Amino acid sequence: MKKGLIFLLFLVVFLASGNSFGQDKEPPKGEVAADSDSYIIGAEDVLYIHVWREEPLSRSVPVRMDGKISIPLIDEIEAAGLTPKQLKEKIAGKLNEFIENPVVSVTVMEANSFKVFVSGQVKAPGVYRLRSEITILQIIPMAGGFTEWADQKKIFNYPERGRQG
């Protein structure tokens, strides 16, 4: 490609709703991947739902692309767009019809819903899962840095539709 080609960096966030920041590896057992008060659950996250003294109801569940999870007794429930604490309360409320005073915990085991797509004059364009909030200039080294044809003064950030950035 010729010199002066514009370097394009597409920042596209795939979320059912809300903001969340992902991880590409499962944390060690027992480690919470995300803060239950502020993390917003999104599609492709993996949650561990624990119902105290109800082991048959406790399980790891993926958040589907439609934002829902499936749990015995209550079938489908919307998870995307909620914090783990909000989801815990919602599940406990639904289980209350079947179990007296259910004690529920929700742990984000894999936060997979925050991704960026990097393209243009970088050495390794592609999809990158993020572990935390990150800037464009921090993403470029993740993509192998610039190629020799990159115009480093022309970097663009295309935010998710409806968001400013």
Image (spheres, rainbow, N blue to C red):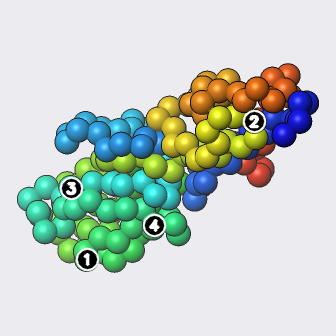
Determine the CA span between mark 1 and mark 2: 51 Å
With respect to residue 86, does 9 lie above or below? above
Please tell me the numbered disc located at residue 73: 1
Please tell me the numbered disc located at residue 64: 4
Determine the CA span between mark 4 and mark 1: 18 Å
Callout 1 secondary element = loop
Residue at the disc numbered 2: 121
- Please give the name of the residue rendered at 36% of the width and 42% of the height, measured from the top-left corner: 25
- Please give the name of the residue rendered at 32% of the width and 62% of the height, measured from the top-left corner: 61
With respect to residue 22, does 62 lie above or below? below
Label whose residue precedes the other's in the sequence (4 or 3): 3
Label whose residue precedes the other's in the sequence (3 or 1): 3
Residue at the disc numbered 3: 50
On the question of residue 36 being in view, the answer is: no
Determine the CA span between mark 3 and mark 1: 14 Å
Q: Which kind of residue does numbered mark 1 sit on?
A: Leu
Callout 4 secondary element = loop
On the question of residue 22 being in view, the answer is: yes
Callout 2 secondary element = loop
Q: Which kind of residue does numbered mark 2 sit on?
A: Gln
Label whose residue precedes the other's in the sequence (4 or 1): 4
- Quadrant in which the C terminus appears: top right
Disc 3 crowd rating (10 Å Cα; few below 14, some 14-19, many 20+) is some
Q: Which kind of residue does numbered mark 3 sit on?
A: His
- Please give the name of the residue rendered at 23% of the width and 38% of the height, measured from the top-left corner: 28
x and y percentages locating residue 1 in the rendered image: 84, 40
Disc 2 crowd rating (10 Å Cα; few below 14, some 14-19, many 20+) is many
Q: Which residue appears farthest toward the left when viewing the image?
A: 53
Q: Which kind of residue does numbered mark 4 sit on?
A: Arg
From the image, state whether disc 1 or disc 2 is nearer to you.
2
Compare residues 15 and 79 and report the one nearer the observer.
Answer: 15
x and y percentages locating residue 121 in the rendered image: 75, 36
